[in-house]
Image: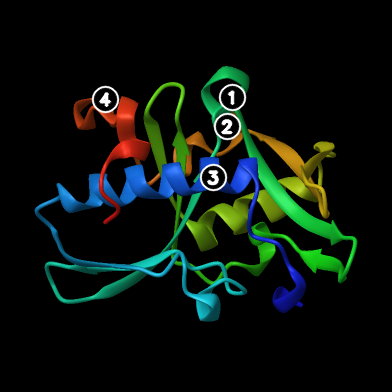
Amino acid sequence: MTDDINYNGKMMKKGKEGEFTVFKYLKTLDNILYIIDLSEDETFRKPDIDGIIIDSKFIPHTIEIKSDKRIDETSNIWWETHRMYNISGYYEGWATRSKSEYLFIYCSKTNNLYIFKFEILRNRINELKKNIKFISKSVQTNSECITFGELIPLKMVEDIIYKKENLNSLKTDNIAQEEKL
């Protein structure tokens, strides 16, 4: 139940910085007419939708943004399967819960951005899981939550990366000090 979930903490702060960087990047694209930041909207937290972008053909696309500072170092995607909360118990992870059309994974260490069509990525990983047991891990998200997930080798999904960008040109070193979108 999302009402009992704490969306604060160190990891959430890192996530907000990644969201800010991705939204800033999207503002630079000529084929994006409008960006709606929904990351603070309670209604869109449960379906894991951080925003809506309207393209040059006036078609809306939902997006989910994840920050993963180690994706380029480990060559793995963190695939969140579920969370356990002290207060509310089990909660499905964003990997299966998100209703977004696109998944953006931002690496703050390298400024690389990976963009996937979420359904294609989800289908590929589900197919791979039929024959492969991925490494499972857990992370203490904050004092109230432990997050569980699997490490998916990037090389197993690199052929379905919709787009990969390096965002160094955004000069994001001081991104947290800049004005919010």
Q: Give the colour scheme of this rendering.
A: rainbow
Give the mark nearest the N terminus, 2 or 3. Answer: 3
Q: Which of marks 3 and 1 is in front?
A: 3
- Locate the C terminus by quadrant: bottom left
Q: Dot 2: few (<14), some (14–19), or many (≥20) neighbours within 10 Å? A: some
Give the mark nearest the N terminus, 2 or 4. Answer: 2
Taking the image as shown, residue 131 lies to the left or right of residue 17, namely: right
Report helix, strand or loop for mark 1.
loop
Q: In this view, does 137 lie above or below 45?
A: above
Q: Nearer the viewer, mark 2 or mark 3?
A: 3
Q: Dot 3: few (<14), some (14–19), or many (≥20) neighbours within 10 Å? A: few
* Residue type at numbered disc 4: Asn
Report helix, strand or loop for mark 2.
helix
Mark 2–mark 4 distance (CA, rounded to whole Å): 21 Å
Report helix, strand or loop for mark 3.
helix
* Residue type at numbered disc 3: Lys
Query: Label 2 belongs to which residue?
Result: 154
Give the mark nearest the N terminus, 4 or 1. Answer: 1
Give the mark nearest the N terminus, 3 or 1. Answer: 3
The mark found on residue 75 in the picture is 1
- Locate the N terminus by quadrant: bottom right
* Residue type at numbered disc 1: Ser
Give the mark nearest the N terminus, 4 or 3. Answer: 3
Q: In this view, does 60 lie above or below 153?
A: below
Query: Label 4 belongs to which residue?
Result: 168
Q: Is there a contact, CB below 8 Å, between mark 4 and mark 3?
A: no
Query: Label 3 belongs to which residue?
Result: 13
Taking the image as shown, residue 158 lies to the left or right of residue 153, namely: left
Residue at the image position 55 percent from the left and 52 percent from the top: 121
Residue at the image position 28 percent from the left and 75 percent from the top: 60
Q: Dot 1: few (<14), some (14–19), or many (≥20) neighbours within 10 Å? A: few
